[in-house]
Image: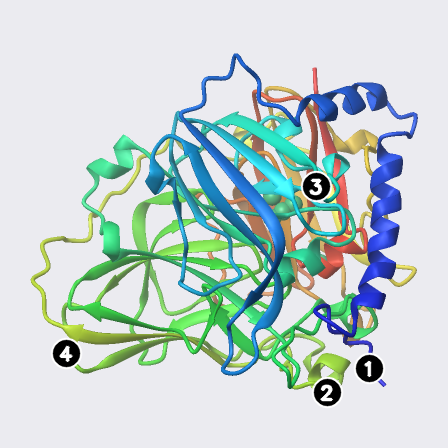
Amino acid sequence: MTDVIDPGAIGRRKLLQVSGFAAAAAACSNLVPTRGGQKELQDSARRSEPTASFAADVDISLRASAKQVGILPGNPTACWAFDGDVLHGDANTLEMPAPSTYLGPTIRVKRGQKVRIRFTSGIPEPSIVHWHGLHVPAEMDGHPRYAISQGQTFTYEFEIRNRPGTYWYHAHPDRVTGAQVYRGLAGLFIVNDAEEDALALPRGAFDVPLVVQDRLFDGDNQLLYSNRGMQLMTGMLGNRILVNGRPDFALRVSTRAYRVRLLNGSNSRIYKLAFRDGTPLVVIGTDGGLLERPVSRPSLLLGPAERVELWVDFSERSVGSRADLVSLPFDYPGTPAMGMGPGAAQGAPPNGSAFNLVRFEIDRKEPEPLRLPDRLLDERPFGLPDAADAEHPRDFPLFMNRMRWTIAGRTFQMTEAAPNERIRLGSVAAVRFRNESGGMGMMMRMAHPMHIHGGQFRVVDRRGPTVDGLLDLGWKDTVLVMPDQQVTLVMPFQDYEGLFLYHCHNLEHEDQGMMRNFLVGA
Ligand code: C2O
Ligand code: CU
Ligand code: CU
C-alpha cells in the first residue's frame, strides 16, 4: 500500500481533497476579520484590471492551464503549465527554455523596467504566481491570500529593482504549492542591466539557464505525487532528473566559455554539483546575482530554490569529448530509513544519491575571445553591524511538532505575524534559523532550505557540524540549513510595507505549514 498518487489521472480524487481544503482556506481568507481584511478584498478586486497610470515597458499575459507534454518516449504527460504572450514591449522578453517542456517561458527583463503581468488561471484550484527573489510590493508578491480561481485574472505591476541575476517564478497557493510546482507551474525570471552588460561575460547562446528538477513517473509516463506519509517528512523525491523539463539532458557546446545559470527547481531534492572528472566549479553568482569576484570550488550543495551561476570554460577540451555535470553522493541523515519510504518503493532514491545532471558534448572548435574577469560587481560591504538587532537576532528554531514541521513551533496562518515577526520598514533585520533536529531520532533530521520573500539577504554566520559544499557568498534569498546547524543572516526591509512570507522551500514542508509572515510596517 502506498500513498504516492498520480495527479494526472487516477489520483485526482486525492488531490482534490487537498485542493478543496485550499479552496476553502482561500475563500475564507477574504472574510476573516483580520487587520486589513476589507482592504484586501477591495485591492484584489482592483487587481484584475491594469492601472491606467502605470506606464508598462513590457506587458505580458501569463496563463496556467492543463497541458499534455511529451517528456518521456511514449505517452505524453498530463501537466499544468504556464504559457505567455508579450502584449506590448520587447518580443524577446519571453523565451521557451526547451521545445517540449512543462516549464513556463523564461522572462527576461532589465533593471528599471516597469513590468505588467496579467496572470490568468485556467486550472481547477486556487492559484497565484510568486516572483521568487524579486523586491516588489507585498501586494505584487503572490501571497497565497491573493489566490484566484479558474477563469480569474490577477494583474501584477512592478518595477524591476533587483540586481541583475537569475530569479524565478512559480505557483504559490496555500497548501498546494508543492503539487502545482511539481506539475509544472514554474519558470525562470532573468534580470540584467547595463553594468552587467559592461562585463565581458558570455551572452546569447553562451548564456545557458538550466532548471534541475526530479520527478517520479508511473509506467504510463504520468507524474506521481504525494505530500503525505513519508513525503510529509522528507518531501517529494523523484527518480528521474529533468533539466529544463527534459530527460537525459545533453547540450552541444563549442570550445568556449559559457555562463551556466543553475536553478534547483526541485520540491525537496538537494544536489551536490560537481564535474565528474573533478574540474573545479568556477562560481560567478548566487541567488541575487554576481559575486564581487569569482571563486572556485570542487563541489557545491544546491538546495531547493537556490541558484548558482558558473563560468564553464571548454576551451581546453577537445572536440568529440564530453564533460558531465553530476550530483555527487553525500551523507544525508535519515537516509537509510527514508530509503524505505513509498517513494523508494516506486524507485525514488533518497536525498544524497548520485545522479547525472547535464552532459556537455564538445562538438566544434571556436576561438574564445573572453577571459574570466577577476572582478565582477563591486558591492558595499554589508553584514551584521548593519542590522538594528545585531546583538539579538530574531531566533527561529526549526523542529517538528505534532507530526508537522514548524518554525518556532508555529505553523502558517494566512495573515498572522507574531511579535518577533514584525519588522520596521527601512530597517535591517538579523534572523537566525536553528535546525533543531538533533536528538529527535534519525527520522526527524532533515535539511531546511529557508527562504525569505521580498528581497535578498547576506549569510553572516553558520555554526554546527561542518558540511562540505555549502557556499554562503553573495546575495541570497534561500539558505540551506543542514541538521543541527544554525545560520544567521541579515536582510534589509526597504521600500515596501506589508506581509512577506518566509518559509522552508522544501515544498512539502511549506505546504504542511512550515511558513510564516513577516509584517513590515512603520
Ligand atoms: Cu520560491 Cu515563497 O517561494
Ligand atoms: Cu520567494
Ligand atoms: Cu523544511
Discs 3, 1 touching: Cβ within 8 Å: no
Q: Give the residue type that dot 4 points to.
A: Val
In the rendered image, the quadrant that contains the N terminus is bottom right
Q: Residues within 10 Å of mark 3 (few under 14, many from 20)?
A: few
Of 417 and 439, nearer the camera is 417
Q: Give the residue type that dot 3 points to.
A: Gly
Discs 1, 4 touching: Cβ within 8 Å: no
Q: Earlier in the sequence, mark 4 or mark 2?
A: 4
* Image position, residue 505 (x, y; %): 65, 54
- The residue wearing badge 2 is 345
Q: Is residue 445 visible?
A: no
Discs 1, 2 touching: Cβ within 8 Å: yes
Q: Is residue 297 visible?
A: yes
Q: Secondary structure at mark 1?
A: loop
The quadrant where residue 223 appears: bottom right
> Residue 2, which numbered label?
1
- The residue wearing badge 4 is 319
Discs 2, 3 touching: Cβ within 8 Å: no
Q: Secondary structure at mark 4?
A: loop
